[in-house]
């Protein structure tokens, strides 16, 4: 009965893409939203059928024994010889949830039988054809008190049509005596176990696996990304949606909420893709807030941070190779502090904001840059000047391997003098500083962060295909089809031994890549 488990797990994987809760309805807008469309559910269903095809041959029905008309019989070594998958369907019930129905599977099985009465003892083999195998149930998708997903089977029913037997070997007049009994034994055994098994799979094993999914994940060692569910899922006729917190906290201070709230997410009516994900710029603003509040956005820029070829620009005394340096552009620095190097102590003074609009993504940052003269081995670091800085940049967002990547294209930095201990500062010095120091250091560093990729709440077994990225007010919208690639088919061995009938080996792992 690996069959039905595969079916089930294929269905569960969709539930794992989206975790759904009703533990505490959060009236606030979500920072992240997922939509699974009818096409997505159809795909889940087709994956289930594929799994059926490949696994049903390996299913095994446990040995049976009983007594009929004084004959003790046993049947063993029962295995599937042919399988025609059911027509199956995972469908939406608007306002309610999901149902999963499968009907008209055909299974042919072969097995050995043995019987005994008084001195008569004989055996042979049999072929049985089971047609009209059907089942149906509701899937309740829910969450526990921690915002983790939970799933429960409700109202499972199964039925079997005809069972047709053919016996080989032994004495045929005897077979007819228990033929009906064996047919009924097989049928009852399957019928009784099918729903029990599905319920167990869903309610115990499935729930356990879903509960293992990390709904929060660490980012850059300092932050905590929270994809917990923030409201009940809603079920429409064409899709269902899940709503997630979508907030990023300071790792050691995960209870401090960011002071701004997520904006309303724009709707969209294209439901052609299997899955849609809405990422609010609120997610990025909340990481900006946590970073700003905990003094993460500070940086000292020294000569060593610059490429070797341009280190000289921060010298207070220019060398022959570098005609322009701080000391020549601000002569007072060169006169007062010769043969020293300038250090830039930069800090963000406002929460950096990312803005998404239909035309794309931009980032604004505001800070100050204090400049000091330093000399190796000396603790005397005279203050030179203080600058205000505003940075604006477009961000190129892309998606690859189910991760969101950000890349800064060109940053415009505007500097203004706040305070100077070294006289008048020329505009050409400020331009020089931006070009030679800030752009060469800040952009690569920011891009290094962006290169790590931002995780989405999908399991490692789901790959995106035909992925489209678009932008709307405050929202990055991803529309994608899915390709399910199970990591482990470990419990299934192709060569020998059929799988156990009673499901207790690991199902398809719902590993979370986060
Ligand atoms: C920058 O340098 C100053 C002075 O040495 C120091 O107090 C501060 O902690 C440094 N900041 C960082 C982020 O390294
Ligand atoms: C910068 O100044 C230091 C001494 O303060 C010197 O050793 C170094 O060669 C200078 N670098 C350049 C590129 O001029
Ligand atoms: C970023 O800065 C520009 C220029 O100052 C401004 O027009 C824009 O509104 C700012 N965006 C945000 C999100 O603050
Ligand atoms: C954005 O990044 C992607 C991936 O690195 C790249 O293929 C694309 O050309 C970039 N777009 C722009 C406008 O720079």
Image (cartoon, helix red, strand yellow):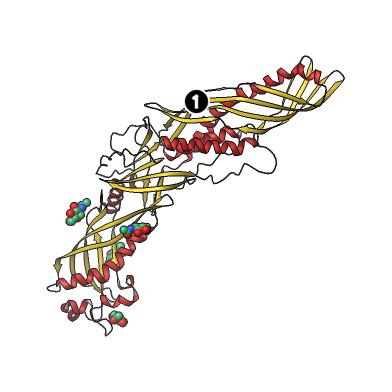
At 52% across and 45% down in the image, what residue appears?
485
- Residue 194 in percent (x, y) is at 59, 26
At 44% across and 52% down in the image, what residue appears?
401
Q: Badge 1: few (under 14), some or many (20 or more) residues near its Cα, within 10 Å?
A: many
**Is 119 situated left or right of 244 in this image?**
right
For the N terminus, the image quarter is top right
- Toward the left, the furthest residue is 424
Q: Nearer the viewer, residue 71 or 482?
A: 482
Q: Quadrant of residue 363?
A: bottom left
At 67% across and 19% down in the image, what residue appears?
184
Q: Is residue 290 above or below residue 200?
A: below
- Residue 368 in percent (x, y) is at 21, 62
Q: Nearer the viewer, residue 426 or 42?
A: 42
- Toward the right, the furthest residue is 119
The reply to whether residue 257 is in sight is yes
- Residue 141 in percent (x, y) is at 43, 31
The reply to whether residue 407 is in sight is no
Q: Nearer the viewer, residue 361 or 173?
A: 173
Where disc 1 sits, the SS reads strand
At 52% across and 39% down in the image, what residue appears?
47
Residue position marked by numbered label 1 in the rendering: 137
Q: Is residue 237 above or below residue 297?
A: above
Quarter of the rendered image showing ligand 4: bottom left
**Is 459 situated left or right of 411 in this image?**
right
- Toward the bottom, the furthest residue is 320
């Amino acid at each position: 009965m690996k069959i039905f488990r595969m079916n089930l797990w294929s269905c569960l994987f969709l539930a794992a893409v989206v975790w759904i809760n009703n533990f505490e309805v959060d009236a606030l807008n979500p920072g992240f939203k997922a939509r699974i469309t009818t096409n997505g559910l159809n795909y889940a269903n087709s994956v289930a059928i594929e799994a059926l095809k490949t696994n049903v041959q390996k299913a095994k029905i446990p040995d049976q024994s009983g007594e009929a008309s004084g004959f003790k019989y046993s049947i063993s070594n029962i295995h599937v010889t042919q399988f025609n998958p059911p027509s199956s369907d995972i469908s939406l019930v608007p306002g309610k949830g999901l149902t999963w129905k499968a009907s008209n599977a055909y299974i042919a099985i072969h097995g050995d039988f043995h019987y005994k009465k008084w001195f008569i003892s004989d055996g042979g083999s049999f072929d049985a054809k089971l047609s009209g195998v059907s089942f149906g149930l509701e899937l309740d998708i829910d969450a526990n008190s921690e915002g983790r997903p939970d799933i429960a089977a409700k109202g499972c029913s199964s039925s079997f049509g005809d069972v047709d037997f053919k016996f080989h070997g032994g004495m045929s007049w005897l077979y007819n005596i228990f033929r009906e009994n064996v047919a009924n034994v097989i049928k009852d055994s399957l019928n009784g176990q099918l729903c029990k098994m599905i319920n167990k799979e869903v309610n115990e094993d499935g729930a356990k696996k879903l509960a293992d999914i990390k709904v929060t994940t660490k980012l850059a060692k300092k932050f905590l990304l929270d994809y917990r569910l923030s409201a009940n899922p809603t079920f429409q006729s064409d899709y269902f949606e899940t709503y997630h917190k979508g907030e990023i906290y300071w790792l050691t201070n995960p209870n401090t909420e960011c002071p701004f709230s997520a904006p309303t997410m724009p709707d969209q009516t294209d439901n052609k893709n299997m899955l849609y994900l809405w990422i609010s710029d609120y997610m990025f603003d909340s990481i900006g807030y946590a970073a700003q509040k905990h003094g993460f956005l500070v940086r000292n820029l020294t000569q060593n941070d610059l490429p070797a070829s341009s280190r000289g620009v921060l010298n207070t005394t220019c060398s022959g190779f570098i005609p322009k340096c701080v000391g020549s552009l601000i002569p007072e620095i060169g006169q007062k502090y010769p043969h020293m190097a300038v250090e830039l102590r930069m800090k963000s003074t406002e929460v950096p904001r990312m803005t998404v609009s239909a035309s794309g993504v931009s980032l604004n940052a505001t800070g100050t840059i204090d400049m000091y003269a330093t000399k190796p081995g000396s603790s005397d670091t005279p203050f030179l000047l203080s600058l205000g800085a505003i940075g604006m940049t477009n961000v190129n967002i892309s998606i690859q391997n189910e991760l969101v990547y950000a890349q800064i294209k060109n940053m415009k930095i505007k500097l203004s003098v706040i305070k100077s201990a070294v006289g008048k500062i020329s505009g050409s010095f400020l331009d020089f500083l931006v070009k030679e120091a800030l752009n060469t250091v800040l952009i690569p560093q920011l891009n290094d962060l962006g290169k790590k990729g931002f995780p989405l709440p999908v399991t490692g077994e789901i790959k995106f295909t035909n992925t489209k990225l678009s932008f709307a007010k405050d929202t990055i919208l991803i529309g994608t089809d899915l390709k399910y690639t199970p990591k482990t088919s470990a419990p299934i061995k192709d060569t020998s031994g059929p799988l156990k009938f009673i499901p207790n080996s690991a199902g398809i792992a719902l590993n979370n890549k986060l």
